[in-house]
Each structure stands twice: as C-alpha cells, then as structure tokens.
Image: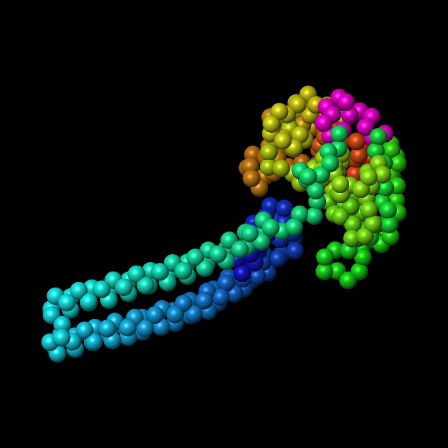
Amino acid sequence: YEKRMWYISNRAGNYSTAKDIRIFGIRSWLAELGEQAVGAYTAFWKRAEGVYIWARITDLILTFLRNGIAYFYLIRLVIAGELTTAEFLLYFSAVGGFTVWGCGILRSFAELHRHSLDLSTVRECLEYPELFQFENGEKEESTDMTYSDKNNLSALYEIRLENVSFRYPGSEKDVLSGINLTLHPGEKLAVVGVNGAGKTTLVRLICGLYDPTEGRVLLNGKDIRSYNRRDYYKLFSAVFQNFSILAGTIAVNVAQTEDEIDLDRVKKCLDEAGLKQKIESFRDQYNTLLNREVYEEAVELSGGELQRLMLARALYKNSPIVVLDEPTAALDPIAESELYQKYN
C-alpha cells in the first residue's frame, strides 16, 4: 500500500509527466487513484489496529486476572493470620516486580521477532545468488590501458554468440532461440527487426547484462562467464533508448564521475558530438547543471541535444565496442542520419 501511494504521488509530481497530465486531463484520475490508495492504506491500518486493540484488551484482562488471583490469595492469608503485614508487603512487591519483568521480557521477544522479520528480508537480499563472476573472475588485460592507448582496440575483439537462447524468469517461451552471430573485429553491424523481436535482449546479452539460458557468448573464443564482469563491462560504450541523465553538471554527465574529470577531453568529445557550441552558450558552460527535478536552475536540453550528449559520453569512455540500442528513436530522419554519421 505504501509503494502504491508513493508511486502515484511520484508520478503526479514528476516533471516529465506534467505535459501528459495537462494535455489528456488526467489530474482528476490521478487524484482518484491517490484517494483509493490512501483509502486502502487506511483500511489496512484499521484492520491492523483492530488486531492490536484486541491483543491489548486480552493482555489487560489476563493481567487483571493474574494480579487479582495473586492479591486475593495473599489477602486471604493475611486475614487467616498465616502472613504478617511485612511478609504481605514483601510478596505483594514480588508479584508486582515479577509481572513487570515478565511483561518486559515478552515485549522484548515480540520486538526481536519484528526486527528478525526485517533483517531476514535484508539477509535474503544479501544472500541472493550472484550469477556473474566479479573479483573471482579472470582479468581482461586491455581494461588497464590508458585513454591514448585505446585508439585501435576495436580491431582486437571478436564477439560470438553460439546457439544462444534466452528466456525471462517466469516466462513460458524464449525471447531468443538458437541465435548464432559473429561480430568481427572492426565490423559495423545493424540488427533490424519488428517491435518485440528481441533486439534489446540481444544487446543486453552481448553487453553481459544477461546470461543466456542456453548457449554461450564468447569474447575472442572465450566464454565471457569466466571474466570479471566489471572488466567486461569496460569494453563497451553503450547508448540505450532509455538512457540516464545524472543530476549534475554537463561535464559530470559526459565523464560519468565527479573525480578527476579531464575537461579538455570532455570539450573534445562534445565538439565531436556537435554540442560544444550549444554548451558554451550557457552561462556556466561545462558546469551547467542538468535535471530540473533536482536543481531549479538546471537547463533542459532537447531530445536531439540529449542524444548528442550520450554520443559525447560514449566517446569519452573510449571503449573498443560501441553498442547502440535505438538511441535515435525520438529524432527526425535527418537528425538521426546525422547522428549515425557521427557515431560512424
């Protein structure tokens, strides 16, 4: 219920959805969804509090019966002359103290149980089996090369898919089945297919984001599962259709780090991407902030400008393999052609 409330609230206040909310008049619908979510959340807590209050009432009744029986027994002994006043006070205090301690221990056990449920969720996450090799995997040597050493690295790598099939967890059929494909060193390849054909899944298999359900992905004849997966990721400059814009400066978004940014390299990459003139027209130039959801003074780049920013990011990383997953889907044909020429 909390997730549902958070999601609706987040979408209603999201800057990127404002145009849809206004054009399609869905404010009242979102408000209705919000009220339903709050109503469901409130109803849940009413049910929960109903359980809690009956537990408290039961606890009070049991406490009253326990204390009543103990005190009645002690008072009867005093009246019968079997207990002195001092002994009565001693036993009376002992019963009261024992009650407090017993209740405290039970409350502590209940609290420990609640914490154990939370911790079991965290533990389940931490103990979730890691499908990829990281520190235990083999090192890919070229990832230690400097920026200037990487100029002709694309000629060193061949990626081959050997009878690769992939099925998403819980699905009843394969998205890809029996794919055999070789990407030769230095080759430029376009994969064309209808929506839902599995192009994005293929890209993610090549990039090592997924492992095949069957078959192997080979780098220079060696199964990529044997490599340190972080080293394998370093071989790729990938631009996806749904790319991420960091809440930071333009330089940070190109370099993907806030530490040791090579500003001259940032400028060179933005120039090659055809965005340098636009960036230098801003007051803060390369320190201009992006993402208006976080910074009020941030600028908003157009779709084409964001695509060029992604090209600059790919150039800055300077990896030997560039993978593009429909990064120009939002562009007109002329801008798309121009951008692909720049990638080329």
Residue depicted at 35% across the width and 60% down the height: 105
Front position in the image: 97 or 1: 97
Instruction: Tell me residue 178's x, y (percent).
Output: 87, 52
Residue 132 position within the rendered picture, expressed as x and y whole percent measured from the top left: 70, 45
In screen coordinates, is 140 left or right of 344? Answer: left
Residue at 17 percent across and 64 percent down: it is 90
Residue closest to the far front: 82
How many tags in the picture?
0
Q: Quadrant of the N terminus?
A: bottom right
- Magenta segment includes 197: no
Q: State the image coordinates of residue 75 (x, y, percent, origin top left).
A: 16, 75
Task: In this rendered view, identify the residue nearer to me: 205 or 282.
Answer: 205
- 56 lies left or right of 231: left
151 is within the stretch colored magenta: yes
Residue at image location 76% in from the left, 29% down from the top: 142
Which image quadrant: the C terminus?
A: top right
- Give residue 102's quadrant in the image: bottom left
Q: Which region shows up in magenta?
A: 142-155
User: What's the residue at 64%, 28% (across, down)?
Assistant: 251
Q: Do we see residue 270 in this rendering?
A: no
Residue 255 x %, y %: 66, 30
- Tell me: 87 left or right of 154: left
Picture quarter containing residue 59?
bottom left
Quarter where residue 168 is shown? bottom right
Q: Which secondary structure dominates the residues rendered in magenta?
A: helix
